[in-house]
Image (cartoon, grey):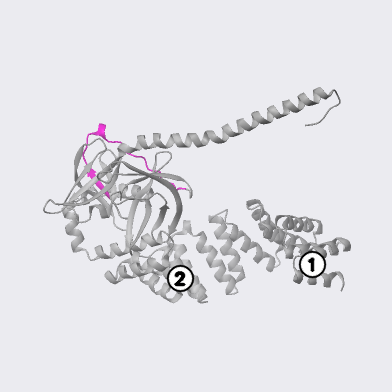
Amino acid sequence: MKRYTGSAMRVVNARRTSIQILVLLSALALLVIASPQTSAQDALPELVRRIKPSAVAIETFDARGEKLSRGSGFFIDIDRVVTNRHVIEGAYRAEVHLNSGSTFQVKNVLAVDAEGDIALLKVEAPPNLVRPLPLDRTSPQEGESVVVIGNPFGLEGSVTNGIVSAVRDIPGFGRIIQITAPISPGSSGSPVVNMRGQVIGVATLQITGGQSVNFAIPSERIAQLDRTAQTEASQQMSLGDLVAATGRNQRARAVEYFRDGLSFLSKDDCQRALPYFQKATDSDNGYGEAWAQTGFCNEKLGRHAEAIEASKKAVSTRPSAESYFNIGLANYYLKQYRESEQAYRQAIRLDPYNAADAYYALGLTYRDSGQFDDEIQAYKQAIRLKPDYAIAYDRLGQRYLQSKKYAEAIDIFKQLSAQRPGDANAQNNLGEAYEALGRHDEAVEAFRQATRLKPDFGKAYFNLGKTLLSQGNRDGAIEQYVVLQNLDQDWAEKLYGLIYP
């Protein structure tokens, strides 16, 4: 606050007024900070009250009518309940218990996703008692708050909350959501709900190798299962029919191993996941999904030859872009560039609209095999499919620089800088392209921007000193040399050699 001339009393009053204003502003700031927290705390109980009636408890019985297992589920339509596949494992009859206390029989099984461990059940309950939950088919954000409403018997309507700790995209399977909200036994099949009351996934409790793993199968898979049920109504079966079909199917045991492996893969733990996928392929040699994940895990662990072998078995039974990409990647690391190119091309052919990564990887293959024109075209295709593909812009710009196509390099690095304003490397590369064309002033500004963004960027200081020297600004170049002496001796010596030839 500025001090003005006047009586001492005016100064005292001004100070007093200033203090009062600061106190008032501080109180208002605290009120603003506190309000969202109170709002969030108030919102959770209201959300729970709203979605609790949608969750159900599921009790299953064996062929003799004895109680078999307990689990949870939820309505997605007035007559459709979603749960985990393993909740109804071996059951000949099942009951759905509503939060209101009413009980209804499961009429039949509409559809099953064995790998995803979800099942869609037909339940005929009075519509006025049913509260279907909407599905959010978009991918949740890491850190997003979630609520799980379970119904283990004796603790009906139990609530846990947490956050989405990770969303993993597993090639050949899809997304898996890792959550911090604990899932108790009996709550498998519960809805995982966001703060808008939409289902983002089905809660799954896996106990594998003595370790409990909580994760959720995303709602996009529920939607796919629902579409399957609507288009294949003739394939509905009773619970008893499902037990009989499972018993005749050699894949049933393999799927159990597969799900165990998936539980570890949800935590990006390929080391522990791989043995279960291998057991799945041992149980059923024609299980393409298990071969695909075996290949994926082997490649993540750096076992390139094993990854190629498993992925080739995967594509022999179930051709997929993901497995061909895996073959391409493994061959690339083994420097088998022709085989790598062929595999990436197959991946692109199978999924041309989601092939940005395959084109980018193809570009790297062409780079390392010396096919530079093809490398440029591959990066361009990657950018066409994914216009914000920053690393593809960077590789393309670098190739233009190395090929002395400086005008094209400038255009690419400008686009990259617009996408990533804080990218010091992009500014340095832009400066090098300007300098190669003799556009010294623009080069100087680009190099200065690179050093502002990254104050320890030795190469950018060297380039700046070199360009200033070419402009006849020897003192400016010496300034950069002094900076480099305390920063990077190698670049300092190179610049010294230019200043004092």
- State the residue in front, 389 or 60: 60
In the shown orientation, is residue 34 left or right of residue 145? right
Compared to 337, does 418 lie above or below? above
* Residues tagged 1 and 2 counted as in contact (Cβ below 8 A): no
Question: Which residue occupies 77% across, 65% down?
Answer: 486
Q: Position of residue 190 (x, y in %)?
A: 32, 47
**How packed is label 2: few (under 14 Cα within 10 Å), some, or many (20 or more)?**
some
Compared to 287, does 143 lie above or below? above
Element under disc 1: helix
Quarter occupied by the N terminus: top right
396 within the magenta span? no
In the shown orientation, is residue 500 left or right of residue 424? right
Disc 1 from disc 2: Cα separation:
42 Å
- State the residue in front, 252 or 228: 252
Q: Position of residue 79 (x, y in %)?
A: 25, 40
**How packed is label 1: few (under 14 Cα within 10 Å), some, or many (20 or more)?**
some
Examine the residues drawn in magenta and state their main secondary structure.
Answer: loop
Element under disc 2: loop
134 within the magenta span? yes
Residue 137 makes an appearance in the image: no
Q: Give the number of the disc on residue 449.
A: none
Magenta part of the protein: which range?
119-140
Q: Position of residue 74 (x, y in %)?
A: 30, 43
Mark 1 lies on residue:
485
Question: Which residue occupies 31% across, 70% down?
Answer: 279
Mark 2 lies on residue:
301
- State the residue in front, 446 or 439: 446
The image quarter containing residue 103 is: top left
Q: Position of residue 142 (x, y in %)?
A: 48, 50
Type of amino acid at the residue the image marks with label 2:
Leu
Type of amino acid at the residue the image marks with label 1:
Gln
Compared to 227, does 269 lie above or below? below
